[in-house]
């Protein structure tokens, strides 16, 4: 063979062979999985389930506790649901998971396993853990694993409660506005706060058992931001990770716990703003896990549970008032800057004077004897100095409060500017939002890609009036915060109403659809 033909043989044909081999391999794997699935096709009315779990933690930096991707596959009478939960901040837009993650995962699952896109439901816990760059491949793999483990199952549901680990982060102020609690800025003065918002302590639970009674999976839906462990502690799945670990260790038998984040848009971990002790998510997770187990213990699972799935895409109006809100913040910034008072003090001189005046308001600068001595001799030395110092301290305090207000306005102004640019770049007045409805036995769930605030969920639950109907945000995409219409029009500028793409009218569109879906399941 002459050397003339060697490059052709070594490169072009081999590349074609490699591509063909890859195609054949994918076809073979799909056939194997298909055969395995068919071998567990189940009799009419029989519910099948399989689970998978994989560590997706980026371990190149500090790690406090691991993050996981988990898959639950459910099949009954031609209906398939692939439920994936991921310990990540969101499915697209923010964090490590890109906007192409969801369509790519769905495309691979359709190609390899024949699962239609609308049958794939992915929920992010909204923890701020860091996932590996190959999270997409790992997610597909964990679904393959779940398909291989399909077995006949029984299902039961229950509702639990946990009111010790969350608090509403929106503060209702005496002037009628609302602000929020964030580590990004200061708390307002205590005397300005009138009330706080509600929480949702309800835990929605579905337990999936093998036919012999051994637990296979436990789904639990709860609403609270998983942000108790700060970034300085390293990668963390936060309280849902600890709750799931406790549940899985207690149930045993290889059971997998699936945390589904609820309407957590304005719910913080309790005591989130404390600075007197190190923040720790583990105790909160343990409390939640124990409450889940306590409720799950009462479940009596039954065979041939119903599996229903509904999927729709809503057209949500984008906000058209962002420029006006930006202008209002900028005007308030200008007003606050002009309000800064002159003061002779800096922090070094302010702090001791402030303490002296608060501790000894009548005689801050010296003993009472000195004041009496001056008064007896009609001297005017200490008292005028005290008056000047009091004026300086009050001016300095006012400037501090102005600084705190500016800090809050600056943070929320940046969010409004970001979303104005996004809406303008979109070139269309609406955005698409997937809504998925699931029924598993008596357990009903409707999902949405936004950060739903708690009152949205409470309102839907009240309207549906069913004991086992629940709502989840952070699912099948991410469209930032979706507050109530009233919150969206807030003049106090909280994150929920500034870190938002949508118009206030979004609420009625979603709530009416969610109620209809839950009632139809």
Image: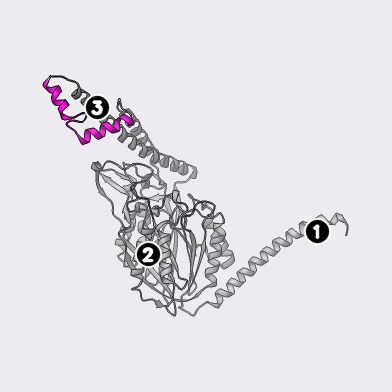
Q: Is residue 269 left or right of residue 75?
A: left
Q: Residue at x 57, y 74 (%)?
A: 36
Residue 354 picture quarter: top left
On whether residue 356 falls in the magenta region, the answer is yes
- Where does the image place residue 32, in percent across and percent down from the top left? 61, 72
Quarter of the N terminus within the rendering: bottom right
Of residues 92 and 400, the one nearer the viewer is: 400
Identify the mark nearer the N-term, 3 or 1: 1
Q: Which residue is mark 2?
A: 289
Q: Is residue 23 left or right of residue 98?
A: right
Identify the mark nearer the N-term, 3 or 2: 2
- Where does the image place residue 89, in percent across and percent down from the top left? 45, 53
* Distance from Cα at disc 3 to Cα at disc 1: 91 Å
- Dominant secondary structure (helix, strand or loop) of the stretch shown in magenta: helix
Q: Is residue 180 above or below residue 328?
A: below
Residue lying furthest right in this view?
Answer: 2
Secondary structure beneath disc 2? Answer: helix
Secondary structure beneath disc 1? Answer: helix
Q: Is residue 406 visible?
A: yes
* Distance from Cα at disc 3 to Cα at disc 2: 55 Å
Of residues 276 and 326, the one nearer the viewer is: 276
Name the mark on residue 389.
Answer: 3
Q: Is residue 437 visible?
A: no
């Amino acid at each position: 063979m002459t050397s003339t033909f060697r490059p052709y043989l070594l490169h072009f044909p081999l590349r074609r062979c490699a591509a063909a081999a890859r195609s054949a391999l994918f076809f073979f794997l799909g056939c194997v999985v298909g055969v395995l699935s068919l071998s567990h096709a189940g009799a009419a009315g029989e519910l099948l389930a399989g689970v998978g779990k994989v560590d997706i933690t980026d371990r190149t930096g500090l790690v406090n506790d691991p993050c996981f991707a988990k898959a639950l596959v459910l099949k009954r009478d031609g209906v398939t649901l692939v439920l994936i939960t991921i310990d990540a901040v969101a499915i697209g837009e923010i964090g490590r998971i890109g906007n192409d993650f969801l369509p790519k995962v769905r495309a691979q699952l359709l190609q390899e396993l024949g699962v239609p896109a609308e049958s794939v439901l992915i929920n992010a816990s909204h923890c701020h853990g860091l996932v590996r760059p190959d999270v997409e491949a790992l997610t597909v793999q964990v679904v393959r694993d779940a398909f291989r483990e399909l077995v006949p199952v029984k299902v039961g549901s229950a509702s639990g409660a946990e009111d010790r680990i969350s608090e509403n982060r929106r503060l209702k102020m005496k002037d009628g506005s609302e602000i929020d609690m964030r580590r990004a800025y200061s708390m307002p003065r205590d005397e300005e706060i009138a009330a706080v918002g509600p929480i949702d302590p309800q835990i929605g639970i579905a337990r999936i058992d093998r036919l012999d009674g051994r637990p296979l999976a436990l789904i639990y839906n709860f609403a609270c931001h998983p942000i108790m462990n700060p970034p300085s502690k390293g990668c963390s799945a936060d309280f849902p990770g600890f709750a799931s670990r406790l549940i899985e260790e207690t149930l045993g038998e290889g059971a997998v716990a699936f945390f589904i984040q609820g309407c957590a848009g304005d719910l913080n971990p309790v005591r989130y703003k404390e600075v007197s002790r190190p923040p720790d998510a583990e105790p909160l997770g343990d409390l939640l896990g124990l409450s889940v187990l306590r409720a799950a213990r009462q479940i009596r699972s039954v065979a041939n549970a119903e599996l229903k799935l509904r999927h729709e895409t809503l057209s949500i109006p984008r906000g058209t008032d962002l420029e006006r809100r930006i202008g209002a913040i900028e005007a308030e910034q200008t007003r606050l800057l002009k309000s800064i008072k002159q003061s002779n003090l800096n922090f070094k001189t302010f702090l001791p004077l402030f303490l002296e005046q608060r501790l000894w308001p009548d005689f801050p600068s010296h003993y009472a004897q000195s004041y009496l001595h001056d008064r007896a001799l009609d001297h005017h030395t200490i008292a005028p100095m005290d008056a000047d110092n009091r004026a300086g301290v009050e001016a300095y305090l006012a400037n501090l409060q102005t600084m705190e207000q500016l800090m809050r306005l600056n943070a929320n102004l940046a969010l409004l500017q970001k979303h104005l640019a996004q809406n303008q770049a979109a070139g269309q007045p609406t955005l698409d939002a997937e809504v998925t409805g699931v029924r598993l036995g008596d357990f009903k769930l409707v999902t949405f890609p936004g950060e739903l605030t708690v009152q949205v969920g409470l309102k839907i639950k009240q309207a549906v009036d069913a004991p086992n109907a629940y709502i989840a945000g952070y699912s099948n995409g991410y469209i930032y915060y979706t507050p109530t219409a009233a919150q969206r029009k807030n003049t106090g500028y909280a994150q929920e109403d500034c870190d938002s793409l949508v118009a206030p009218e979004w609420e009625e569109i979603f709530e009416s659809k969610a109620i209809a879906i839950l009632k139809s399941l």
